[in-house]
Image: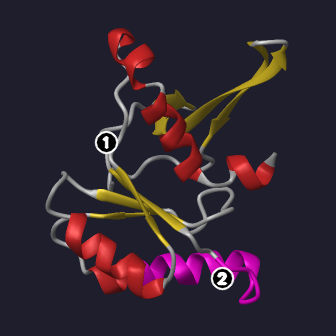
Amino acid sequence: IFPVTGDKYNTYEAVEKARDLLVPHGVYPLRFWRAWNHQDLEQTCEAKRFEVDGLIIKPFQGSGGAGVLPLMKDTSVGEVVEGSLNEFHTKYGQRVSPFPYTVCEKIQPWKATWRGQPHNFDIRIYVARQEDSLIPVGCLFRIAPKPDTGTY
């Protein structure tokens, strides 16, 4: 399952395909793009950065936020891309490829309060197929170990 869930592009694509079911409940798909290599990543970021309030770049198969970085209108695409690649390779080594990257629009996230400080978090719901239905079989709430600094 990790090759599928580790690619955030698949998650965004599933939400986009379910748009008609989700929008009536206040769930709106994000704008997102795929970048297949270093040059494509920089070109995609340059082309899309002024269409939205900011971008988030996410390497393929990353875990724990390694290489997930914001790209704001006042930051250098090259510096952010290099920072992301360095974070990813520091954690996984040079042999593991971070491509394809997912580039998505940045949204204002909600924060969880833990130990009196704001933290970013994920909520994951696990489902299983039973005939033609999907049924929830578990969930996971993951909170970032470091408090949010407000930098993005």
Numbered mark located on residue 107 in the image: 1
Residue at 50 percent across and 42 percent down: it is 13
Badge 1, how many Cα within 10 Å: few under 14, some, many 20+?
few
Q: Quadrant of the C terminus?
A: bottom left
Q: Callout 2, which amino acid?
A: His
Q: Position of residue 49 (x, y in %)?
A: 21, 64
Can you say whether 30 is above or below 22 in the image? below
**Foreground of the two, 102 or 77:** 102
Report helix, strand or loop for mark 2.
helix
Task: Give the mark, 2 or 1, whose residue is nearer the N terminus.
Answer: 2
Q: CA distance from mark 2 to mark 1?
A: 26 Å
Q: Callout 1, which amino acid?
A: Ile
Is any part of residue 120 visible from this angle?
no
Q: Position of residue 29 (x, y in %)?
A: 37, 34
Tell me which segment is drawn in magenta. Answer: 81-97
**Foreground of the two, 79 or 127:** 127
Taken as a whole, is the magenta stretch helix, strand or loop?
Answer: helix
